[in-house]
Image (cartoon, rainbow, N blue to C red):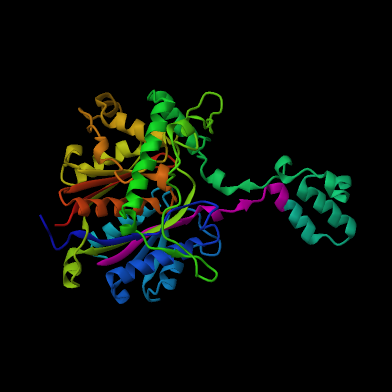
Amino acid sequence: MKSENDVVIVEGVRTPFVKAGLDFKNVHAAELGKQALKELIAKTNLNVKTVDEVIIGNTGTPSDAVNISRVVALNAGIPKEVSAYTVHRNCASAMESVAQGFDKIKSGMAEVVLAGGTENMSQMPLMMSKNQVAAFEALAGARSGGQKLSALAGLVGANLNQVKDLVTTAPFSETPNKPIISLMQGLTDPFCGINMGQTAEILAKEFEISRAQQDEFALSSHQKALRAGESGIHAQEMTPVFLPPKFEKYVSADVGPRKDISLEKLSKLKPFFDKKFGTITVGNSCPITDGAAMILMMKRARAEALGYKPLGVMRSYAFMGLEPERMGLGPTLATPVALKRAGGMKLKDIGLIELNEAFAAQVIACKKAFNSKKFYEDRMGLSEAVGEINDDILNVNGGAIALGHPVGATGSRLIITLLKEMQRRGNVQFGLATLCIGGGQGGAVIVEREN
């Protein structure tokens, strides 16, 4: 039943998603966010003076834009009087921004919120080791040539003779002072000490998921994404991104889905995280990706007063935690809580599902867990399974294995993709957007299509 206090999602826009190191490698995350937000404002003809808050998710935290939400907002033309802040919940940062927008509107603290996420994973920096930092400090304070030479030797992890003859100096990759790759460090859990791919290996073994099953799932993701791209479905949620510095060239389509992919090619890829016994490869995992996705949320009464026809209503959300080494199961724990908060709904009431594809094994494990009575008895004390997920309603336009997963932006992308498809179909009332979260959490959002 409609209420003037409903939180409605008026519209959503995302950039193309591009594999790291390609077209967006020189496009700052703030620029990606700005272009997505400006398009959203233009598409909705939004009077920016009506905006109460801007909330944007980001995980990389660029040093030159530490509150990237404020930078994006001002550059997109939001008045300086409108406050903006950045949120970080790892893979669910953009979903967290939408959840906080929901809470602000529900509580009466705001009526118009711009929420979403932006991420440039290409630009996550290399960091210095402690030894390198100490060497640079020594170099900065050195007065004599000998002191500078000694400091330089410490910097590259070589002896003085090697510094004098740089031809024989070992490259950084072979020294104890090699740079720290912040992206790899960020994708490694500090609690359990393993990276996200290794958590997927755990699920593959525990749920007895074969390499063939994973590769088949990955192939399907690419095939669905290609169909959606070629038919113009993805274009309905995207805005082209013009590339600096001249802004003459632009990217208008996702750079990830592969036309030449096949089971034969996928099967030839070697395991990446457990090279001896593993089944997780770069082919059945999501690629490192750059992109942004923004959403306009409003109190229903305000949306109607402004003449908007929303995409849908946000009914509930939930975040739940679990052990970090099984973080991929997060959706199975957050979803039943979100369903309960949406008025006691059941999974069978859901007509479309967007479940983020961090890894094929992770999605398959979630599907098995969702349909396991024992899993829910042990995990949540429930008397029955949440239910079976029908492949016909899951990630129908492809998922992150093909499209990519810019961690700070995926949460809002899932919601946009879901609501746009619900509107296209016209016969789906409720949808679920859910994802696993590095560190051992899961997030879920329930939406209802607006007639």
Image quadrant in which the C terminus is located: bottom left
Q: Is residue 47 left or right of residue 32?
A: left
Instruction: Residue 73 in the image: state x and y as whole percent.
Output: 41, 69
Horizontal side of residue 195 vs 220, given as left or right: right
Image coordinates for residue 339, horizontal then vertical, percent: 21, 42
Say if the magenta span includes residue 10: no
Magenta range is 111-133
Q: Is residue 110 visible?
A: no
- Is 116 in the magenta? yes
**Relative height, residue 133 to residue 31 (above, below):** above
Q: Is residue 280 left or right of residue 10?
A: right
Q: Outermost residue toward the left?
A: 1
Q: Quadrant of residue 220?
A: top left
Q: Residue at x 24, y 26 (%)?
A: 373
Q: Tell me if I can see residue 293 in this picture.
A: yes
Quadrant (top left, top right, bottom left, bottom right) of the N terminus? bottom left
Front residue of 328 and 129: 328
Residue 65 percent across, percent down from the top left: 51, 64
Residue 334 image point, x, y percent: 30, 41
| Location of residue 361 (image quadrant) | top left
Between 318 and 1, the residue placed more toward the observer is 1
The residue at the point 87 percent across, 47 percent down is 160
